[in-house]
Amino acid sequence: MTEIRTEKQYEVACERIEELLKVVGNETSPENKNYIELDSISNLVADYEEVYYPVRKPELVDNY
C-alpha cells in the first residue's frame, strides 16, 4: 500500500498498528520485519491524518 485512500483503510491500518505495538518495543531492531511494517504503516496513517484530521492551532479566548 502506498497511500490510505478511504476511512476503512485508515481503520484497518490503525488496528494493525495496535497489533504491531504488542510485538515491537524499544529493543526491537530497525531491521526487524515487524518494526519496518510498523514504521511504514505509521507514516501512511500520519499522512492520512494530516489531510483528514488536521490539528488546528489553538485559538486565544478571552475569559471575561
Image (cartoon, helix red, strand yellow):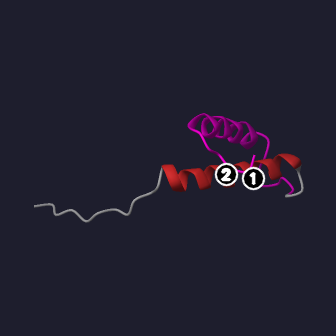
- 57 displayed left or right of 4: left
Q: Which residue is mark 2?
A: 44
Taking the spot 50% from the left edge, 49% from the top edge, the residue there is 52
Q: Identify residue type, mark 2.
A: Leu
Residues rendered magenta in the picture: 1-29
Image: 49 above or below 11:
below
- Marks 1 and 2 close (CB-CB < 8 Å): yes
Q: Position of residue 23 (x, y in %)?
A: 79, 41
The residue sitting at the front extreme is: 5
Residues packed near mark 2 inside 10 Å, few (<14), some (14 to 19) or many (20 plus): some
Name the quarter where the C terminus is drawn: bottom left
Q: Residue at label 1?
A: 40
Helix, strand or loop at disc 1? helix
Q: Picture coordinates of residue 29 (x, y %)?
A: 87, 56
As shown in the figure, which amino acid type bears the numbered disc 1? Ser
Which residue is depicted at the point 68% across and 49% down? 3
Magenta stretch containing residue 34, yes or no?
no
Looking at the rendered structure, the number of numbered marks drawn on it comes to 2
Say few, some or many: other residues with alpha carbon within 10 Å of mark 1 (under 14 / 14 to 19 / 20 or more): some
Could you tell me which secondary element the residue under label 2 belongs to? helix
Q: Position of residue 60 (x, y in %)?
A: 25, 65
Depth check: give the residue in front, 23 or 10.
10
Whole-angstrom CA distance, mark 1 to mark 2, is 6 Å
Q: Nearer the viewer, residue 51 or 64?
A: 51
- Which disc number belongs to residue 16? none
Residue 50 sits above or below residue 11 on the image: below
Looking at the image, residue 20 sits to the left or right of residue 54; the answer is right
Asked if residue 59 lies left or right of residue 57, the reply is left
Q: Magenta stretch: residue 11 in it? A: yes
